[in-house]
Image (tube, rainbow, N blue to C red):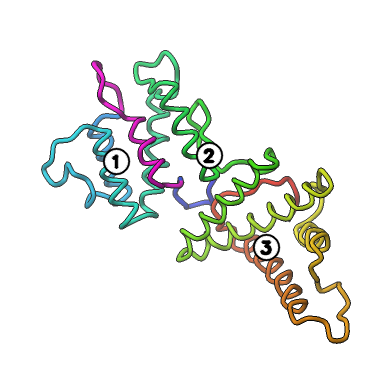
Amino acid sequence: MATSSGQKQRAPVNDAIIVAVARLVDDAQSERRDPSHSEIEFRIKQAGLSAGDPSSQGMVVGKAKRIRAVLSWALENAPDNAEIFVAGLIAHIRGCGGFRKGSPNFIGEEAIEDAAEAFRAEGYALSPDGELGPIVIDTLSGPQLTGALEAYVRRARRGSEDAALVVGTGKDLLEATAAHVISERYGGYSHQANFPTLLGQAFTMLGLATPQTPAQPNEPPQRRLERALYEAGCAVNALRNKEKKGQGTADLGSPT
């Protein structure tokens, strides 16, 4: 999963993902497999989630139950830390050979598929070999693309207190939605178009005004709002390019 320099990797977390991730370390089996309890504890402490760890309270639980407890607590009390923990845990499992057939730590195809489905609903792709990152929206179309865009919206809402995340996600969402509008209308769009051009084309197709749309006498007040929204979208894009702090990317293949 690509991140800006100095930022920790993150992954979305919800109830379905908690269940799926816990299955990746399920210890209800005859033979031991990594990660060990000590390795899980290291990840928990690294993410700052010890307060939700039942083992820190003297409870003896299995690895899967431990992961569920930590993430359920974190989802309510420290969602940002939960995202860091999940990304780190999956990377650790991958490093242990958990996604490699033939490895003594292989977690199983069904567990991988279930986890991939849970992440897909949140706009992330988990590959069979354990690579996790935002879905490349340019590879989607129709209902799948609509679902991915909805995941972007949910992600922005959850990060409402993280200005950098909201700016980055907002820009990605605008760009992806504009491309979706154009593709649905004409079957495709120019990957060479820059962001203002792409957004302007989508506005025009939807009958919305941009600053290039001449003002008419007694025009409805919403036309002024539409022009302002276009300008705001371009400003978000400029801010994203300046700060370079957005998490993930729509990866539309167009210069910004």
Q: Which badge, 3 or 2, comes first in the chain's sequence? A: 2
Q: Position of residue 225 (x, y in %)?
A: 72, 77
Residue drawn at the location 74% of the way across and 77% of the way down: 222
Dot 2 corresponds to which residue? 120
| Left or right of 229, for residue 9 | left
Disc 1 crowd rating (10 Å Cα; few below 14, some 14-19, many 20+) is many
Q: Which badge, 1 or 3, comes first in the chain's sequence? A: 1
| Left or right of 72, for residue 174 | right
Q: What residue type is disc 3 on?
A: Asn
Q: Position of residue 104 (x, y in %)?
A: 34, 16
Q: What residue type is disc 2 on?
A: Arg
Farthest-out residue, top: 102
Residue drawn at the location 26% of the way across and 19% of the way down: 29
Nearest the viewer among 249 and 185 is 185
Determine whether 156 is above or below 192 in the image: below
User: Real-space Cα distance between discs 1 and 3?
Assistant: 38 Å
Tell me the number on the disc at residue 246. none
Dot 3 corresponds to which residue? 237
Dot 1 corresponds to which residue? 68
Determine whether 240 is above or below 29 in the image: below
Disc 2 crowd rating (10 Å Cα; few below 14, some 14-19, many 20+) is many
Nearest the viewer among 253 and 29 is 29
Farthest-out residue, bottom: 218
Q: Which badge, 2 or 1, comes first in the chain's sequence? A: 1
